[in-house]
């Protein structure tokens, strides 16, 4: 092959790369594919870790976006390799972590045991993370539906002092006392999307406000409908900063302000479903963008 043919081939390859992705995207895929090399060669590993935070974050997102393809090789050895790569890319500057892809490589019978290990790893190696999403269909396998997040995982999450957003898979439930502890402990937490593993509980308004007063987005579900309804009432009355509130489909849970007191001040809530009332609810909910009204039936229900 002469020089002109080599040049033409190179041009075609570069054209194909540019059509599929940017040079940065191509590079990060190649790096993630060859992380073993950077871990085995200390000099190259140091260079990789010295990259700007934004580029290291891109590498971590690239790694965690990879998912197990459903073959027969979801072995503990394969998961350990992925976990080693994951740990290698974590740093004190890591800001966002999503575990969907990583945990898809974990064998089904040990997935919850290993999840605790992963969360503890994040607490140790990426303590300043601001967004943590423990999500994915890999937690929805029939054998393991509706597990409760264990104490070790709760303690690890509570140590993430910079955390602003926490989203946990619907099949991973959290006890309400643990949820209150997480929200009370984490001073910057504003976004929570979680499934509650409790029946109806008694809790005071003061304790509720102390735990959840900083939240701006509170999305929840649970096995106790009564508990969720109570949470909606308490959120409306006591959490003026909450902008988005949802329990399954919030429009199915209208609020009757002839029975429930209006909040003492103005609310930041943007979605609201109410029964018709003559009370000046618009003065208390000036930020509402989605308002649904539900008629009472002949029995007043």
Image (cartoon, helix red, strand yellow):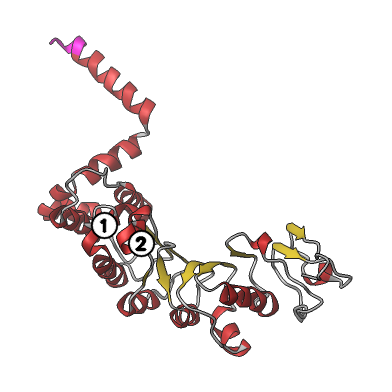
Count of number-bearing discs: 2
Mark 2 neighbour density, 10 Å: few (under 14) some (14–19) many (20 or more): many
Residue drawn 30% across the image and 78% down it:
152
**Residue 77, above or below 239:** above
Q: Give the main secondary structure of the magenta stretch.
A: helix
**Residue 80, above or below 153:** above
Residue 219 disc label = none
Question: Camera-side residue: 22 or 270?
Answer: 270
| Quadrant position of residue 197 | bottom left
Is 177 positioned to the left or the right of 283 in the image?
left
Residue 94 disc label = 2
Question: Camera-side residue: 167 or 140?
Answer: 140
Outermost residue, right direction? 278
**Residue 231, above or below 60:** below
Residue 89 disc label = 1
Which is more N-terminal, label 1 or label 2?
A: 1
Residue drawn 16% across the image and 52% down it:
78
Outermost residue, front direction? 299
Report how far apart the C-alphas of labels 2 and 1 lie in the structure: 9 Å
Query: Is the Cβ of the residue at disc 2 closer than 8 Å to that at disc 1?
Result: yes
> Picture coordinates of residue 92 (x, y %)?
32, 67
Is 223 positioned to the left or the right of 95 in the image?
right
35 drawn magenta = no
| Quadrant position of residue 87 | bottom left
* Magenta residues, start to end: 1-5
């Amino acid at each position: 092959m002469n020089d002109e043919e080599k040049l033409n081939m190179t041009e075609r390859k570069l054209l194909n790369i540019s059509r599929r992705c940017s040079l940065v995207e191509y590079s990060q895929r190649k790096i993630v594919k060859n992380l073993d090399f950077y871990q085995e060669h200390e000099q190259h590993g140091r260079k990789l870790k010295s990259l700007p935070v934004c580029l290291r974050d891109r590498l971590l997102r690239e790694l965690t976006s990879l998912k197990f393809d459903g073959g027969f090789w979801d072995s503990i050895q394969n998961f350990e390799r992925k976990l080693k790569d994951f740990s290698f890319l974590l740093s004190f500057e890591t800001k966002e972590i999503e575990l969907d892809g990583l945990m898809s490589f974990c064998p089904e019978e040990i997935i919850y045991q290993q999840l605790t290990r992963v969360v503890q790893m994040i607490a140790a190696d990426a303590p300043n993370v601001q967004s943590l999403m423990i999500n994915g269909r890999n937690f929805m396998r029939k054998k393991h539906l509706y597990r409760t997040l264990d104490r070790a995982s709760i303690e690890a999450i509570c140590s993430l002092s910079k955390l602003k957003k926490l989203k946990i898979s619907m099949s991973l439930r959290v006890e309400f006392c643990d949820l209150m502890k997480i929200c009370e402990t984490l001073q910057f937490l504003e976004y929570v999307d979680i499934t509650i593993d409790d029946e109806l509980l008694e809790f005071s308004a003061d304790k509720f406000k102390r735990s959840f007063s900083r939240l701006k987005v509170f999305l929840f579900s649970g096995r106790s409908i009564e508990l969720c309804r109570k949470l909606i009432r308490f959120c409306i009355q006591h959490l003026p900063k909450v902008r988005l509130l949802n329990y399954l489909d919030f429009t199915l849970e209208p609020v009757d302000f002839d029975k429930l007191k209006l909040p003492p001040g103005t609310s930041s809530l943007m979605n609201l479903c109410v029964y018709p009332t003559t009370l000046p609810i618009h003065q208390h909910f000036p930020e509402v963008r989605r308002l649904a009204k539900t008629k009472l039936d002949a029995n007043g229900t």
